[in-house]
Each structure stands twice: as C-alpha cells, then as structure tokens.
Amino acid sequence: MKTDIEIAQEAKMLPIGEVAKKIGIDDEYLEYYGKYKAKISSKIWDKIKENKDGKLILVTSINPTPAGEGKSTVTVGLGQALNRLGKKVAIALREPSLGPCMGIKGGAAGGGYSQVVPMEDINLHFTGDMHAITTAHNLLSAMIDNHIHQGNELNIDVRRITWKRAMDMNDRALREIVVGLGGKINGYPRQDGFIITVASEIMAILCLAKDLIDLKDRIGRIIIGYDKDGKPVTAKDLKADGAMTLLLKDAIKPNLVQTLENVPAFVHGGPFANIAHGCNSIMATKYGLKLADYLVTEAGFGADLGAEKFFDIKCRFGGLKPNAAVIVATIRALKMHGGLKKDDLKVEDIDALSKGIGNLVKQIENVKKYGIPVVVAINKFTFDTDREIAYIEEVCNNIGVEVALADVWGKGGNGGIDLAKKVIDACNMPSDFHNLYDADVPIKEKIDIIAKEIYGADGVVYTREALKDIKNIDELGLNDMPVCIAKTQYSLSDNPNLLGRPKGFNITVRELKISAGAGFIVAMTGDIMTMPGLPKHPAAERMNIDEEGKIVGLF
C-alpha cells in the first residue's frame, strides 16, 4: 500500500493558472509561487463581491483519538466528489503547522487519494505565511523589550507583560524562560516564554481580518500588557502596528493550490482549535463562496471545539451562514471512545461501539443547536464490518440524521459520491442558522452556555486568578466579545481521559486572556498549554531527503 507522500508525488497536477480558471480567477489576479502555487490578489474582491454566495458546508468530527478520524481527508474527498457530480466546487483548509508536522501528526494535507498538493510544499514552508506571522509576532516582542530598555516612556510594568514570543515548532523547554540576562546592555531581566505560532493572536487576526486595513486596525488593538497604573498598553501605543502589518502584506492574501483531482483549494491561515479558534481565513472563505457554487471547509478537532468556534466566532465576524455540516466519524475511533485499546480495534465489537457512539450523538446535537442540517460521514477503514456500519446507520436514522459511507482515502472522489449527494440534499433543506449566545451577555454566562450546552457539563468552576481576570475585563469594558475556550481536544470535558459522552463533570477555568485585536476572550481550561511538546518519538525521526531531493516519511 502506497503512503500518502508516495501518492502525492505521483500526482498529475495542473498548472495553477488552469486550476484558477475553473472558478473564474483570471491570470491578472494571481501572484505565482512556482508552477503549482499562487496567492490571490485582493483586487479580485471588487470584481466578485456582488456575486451570489455559493453553499457553505462545514466538515467537523467527533472528538479525535489516536485511531484517527480523517476530517481533512473527507473535506478533500467531498470536494472531489461534488466535482465529479458536475458541481462548481472549491475547498478551504487551514495551513499545517510545523509543530505537529514534526511532532506527533506528520503531514496535514488530507490523505490517500484525497489530498491537497503539492503536499511537501504545503506541509513545510508553503508560501511563507507562517514565517511572516512569526516574524510580525516577534517584532512586537522585540519592540516591547527595546521600549523598556530605552527609557520606558509608556511606564510599562515588566511584571504584567502578557505578550510572549512565538515560534512554529513544539518545544516545551521554551514555555517559561528568562530574558535580558547578561548585564545592562541586554535590557531588563524578566520572566517570559514562547507560544506556538498557531496560538498567536496575530494568526487569529489574520484569519478574521476583512482586508489589509482591518488587519492593521486589529493589530493596533493588541494588548501587550499593562502600565504601572494598571492601564492596558497596545501595539499601537508602541507604534508597532504599521511595521507588523507590512510584514503581513503578502501573508494576508489567500493561497490557491489543488487537490489530487485538480479541484481548486484555498489553503490559508492555521489557528489550532484547542488553543485558538481553529478556522481558515475569512478572506479565503469569502473568495470561495463568491467563486464557487459549493465551498467545503473544515474546523479543527471535534464539533465541541472547531465547529462551535466556527459558528460563534468566525461566522459572527464574517457574516457567514453555513448551509449544512458534515460530522466525520470512524468506527475505530468510536470503539476507542467505548473503551477499547488501539491494538484491539480490528476486531468487531458492537458493545464497545454502543458505548462510544454517545460521542457522535452529542456532536450531532451540538451542530443541530445552530439550526443547520447535519450529515454523518463514516470514514471507512478496511476492518469495519457490515454489522458495525449498520449499527451506526440505525442510531443516526433513529434521530433523523442521514449517514453516508465514505471511502475517499482509497478511492478519492469516487468514494464520496453517496456523501456528496446527501450533502447536496442537506444544502437544499431549510436552514435557520444562529449563534449559540449573544456576545453582549456577561462573560460567565457565555462560558456557562458553552460548557453546559456544547460540552454537557454540570457547571463551571473558576480559580481565583480567573475571577480576577474577569473583573479586569469588566472594568476595561471588553466583556462584550465572544469567548474562545481553550480546552483539550480529546474529550467533551476538560479532562482528556474522559472519553465517550461523559456526565457529571465541571469545567475549570483557570485564567482568561484578552485578545482585543482578534476580538475575543480566551478562557483557559484544564491543563491546556499554548506551547506543545514533542512526543517520545517525533515524526521528524522518520523523515529524510535523498540526494535528488526526494522526501520520505513526511506522512
């Protein structure tokens, strides 16, 4: 059996200009990055902004497990299947981070015969967006310490600087550091740390900005810390917003690539869904909606994280109205949610499946709360049995949800035809999309609604530090923003060991952070961290390149 990278390396790609023409993008709006990648000029918006929006389809999933769900693979496969049915379609994905790419996950561009290509480029440095975001983030860090070193005109309290440094790699040793050591010439010593780039507020801002000027305005509103009187200090106060924006002048332009079946694919932005809002850029999504009749996009991890943030943050800011959602599940993963170990997943086990399927049912309920039709996609694996498939179909049909078996990993678009037909039907059904909560209700009420309605928690517990943070946010008048909850992706709860559909638990909020530029409040729960570590055997150990430049082990 060929690996993902072997399949991708054999792909018959079209020149990106030909791919662009499929959805009406003329050559004058393309900025080429080689033969198979391009950025799209913002000038295209004036041409397409009056076009009728296509159908917006969100692909989400159950809570992930080590057995894998294949959400990106199904997103790509569904797009290819719609294309085979003669639909004018595009897909919109996030850019992979080098952290998980070199860490536990390997590549993140789909899999099998449902991938976006050129896969090696996308998984590595692509068009440089991640580096631009990292550089803009660290320019602000450098200007903070330089300002203090040069006299501290803004009277910044070095004990209350909240802006950390960033890099796009998993490195636990950098979570807590001390900077400014080595004497007066090196600045003021203070405690600092690193976050991974995809957790940076710059990443969130890039993905939520409407255009370059909106990007600059949002960057200017970033709160980097507080002065000695307790007043917030912003990037604009430091006069950093202009330079940071010019570093991002190309990164803000959506990237265009293609799938293995030459379907246009927007790949732009990449915030994690467990520690950020987990969606690709609003600009890429809006371009896709104006250029295609169907736009298939995804949001990170399970519906309790990515989908909730897609609906309550991205759709709220972007004025988007999704027409349907697909929830991806695998029989293997549901059996893990039912208590089976990974080594036992190849054996039929209806009992374990019946215990784990509560996770799927809960995620269906979660998406339905937003008023849009739902289709379940069973991402097929070789060892799935007919009885197990029939069991999932029966459970879903009993709650009025259509189910389709998808073999898009092995068959590409042909393996997703049934799913595509059911998604088309869902898009033609009445939709009453709405947000779960009003942004102007109190912070605790917003968190309480998400915890109880989406996670199924009994309630929310706040640490003393979190209560102080809420008081500060209220006093600053910033409590009318939506909430972005940072939580483990592995469970509906904030405890990664509680699988399936846990009950009788509380969510613990330990601190809240203001992302004034992005426009939301981040609530940190459980033990979630914004700088991951590498596993015992990182994926990087399996990667190599030969003398001809051929890459192996990327996935």
Image (cartoon, rainbow, N blue to C red):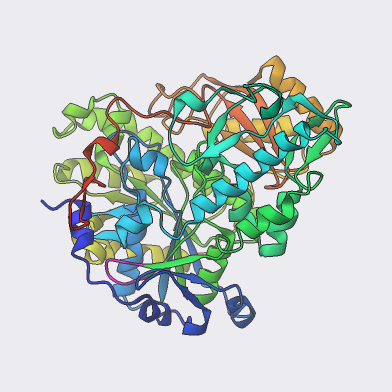
Residue 88 in magenta? Answer: no
Q: Main secondary structure of the magenta part?
A: loop
Q: Residue furthest right?
A: 229
Q: Is residue 411 left or right of residue 357?
A: left
Q: Quadrant of residue 486?
A: top right
Residue at 58%, 60% in the rendered image:
282
Q: Is residue 23 above or below residue 300?
A: below
Q: Is residue 151 left or right of residue 75?
A: right
Residue at 62%, 22% in the rendered image:
182
What percent of the width, then of the height, locates residue 159?
74, 22
Q: What range of the chain is rendered magenta?
A: 258-263
Q: Residue furthest top?
A: 464
Q: Is residue 64 above or below residue 338?
A: below
Residue at 31%, 62% in the rendered image:
118
Q: In the image shown, does 172 or 429 lie closer to the viewer? A: 172
Q: Quadrant of residue 75?
A: bottom left
